[in-house]
Image (cartoon, helix red, strand yellow):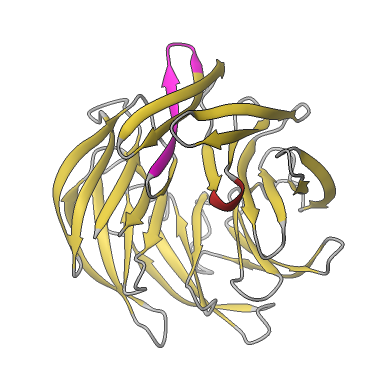
Amino acid sequence: MKIIFGTYTKRISEGIYTVSFNQGIISDLKLSYPLNNPTYFIYKNPVLFAVSQKDKQGGIACFENNQFVNEVMQEGSTPCFVDYVKEKQLVLSANYHLGNIISYAYTPKKGIRLIQKIQYGSGSHAHFARYFKQLDEVLVCDLGLDKIMAYSVDPYLMLHPKYTFNTKEGQGPRHLIAHPVKPIIYVFAELTSELLVLAHDGFGLRQTQCISTLPATEQDIKSGAAIRIDQKGKFIYVSNRGHDSISVFKVDDSAKHVDMIQNIKTQGIYPRDFNISPDGKYLVVVHKDSDNASVFAIDHDHGKLSHLNHDFIVPEAVCVQFSE
């Protein structure tokens, strides 16, 4: 099994790296995609789409079978998020600094071309845009506007507004995940370090719970980052920057309520991203400021994490994905 790491390239990193992963052990770091500040990417064999920076432009670079195909750039800051919808050949990006999302069409061996740009208003910090098949809609998190926006996708890959959910002012929705079976989504609010549980009723979203991701006695630093859910929808994991920890939540049978069952230190500084192995046995978290990857074993029945190791160096890593 392989793991792919996206990074900043401000200090010592040179792009996107891959490593070997075997029974909880990381080895053999290799530079696979030389890029400038590829802080987020999506890999679905054989293609990889990564955010990239070139001079004063930012955009999305497309690779097939480890070979560069093309890139689409725009003036200004680099996007912070990219996703690929294989069944629709649709690529989506979100740009925090420019306050927009962009859709692209992907054609094998030809790469991507821009389809649509949706520009939001003053104060926008679009942070996430992903298509959810079970809901048949694209959901966008705008951290600056405190909004979650839903879009339908037409056959020409154009996005059309469906509804908007407003979070509380100042919560800053960063990323979200969907339950694998039930019409429930879980939103990580970066600025308040809160997990929001939202039920989808076919016409919009309604909140069923809001819970802190930090221990009650340790609420000083609030900077939520990544959120993941296990394949069965039983446990949710979030990373807390500043507090340098991961919190684990148990999902109840209705999927509308969660309880924190563990908060564990990540053994590094600034855990911006993490991911769960395809077999559900391991969680790997990367740290932007301490340049290390930590590995945890996941208890299959109870969801809790056990620290295995944290001494493998991955420079400036801020994005992690497994590849079989």
Residue 72 to residue 207: above or below: above
Q: Is residue 144 visible to us here? A: yes
- Residue at the image point whose x is 84% and y is 60% from the top: 204
Residue 124 lies in what quarter of the image? top right
Q: Is residue 56 magenta?
A: yes
Q: Quadrant of the N terminus?
A: bottom left
Residue 230 to residue 10: above or below: below
Q: Predominant secondary structure in magenta?
A: strand
Q: Quadrant of the C terminus?
A: bottom left
- Residue at the image point whose x is 63% and y is 25% from the top: 98
Residue 2, image x and y in percent? 25, 55
Could you say which is closer to the camera, residue 322 or residue 308? 322
Range of the magenta residues?
47-57
- Residue at the image point whose x is 28% and y is 53% from the top: 3
Could you say which is closer to the camera, residue 124 or residue 247? 124
Residue 39, image x and y in percent? 41, 36
- Residue at the image point whose x is 71% and y is 71% from the top: 183
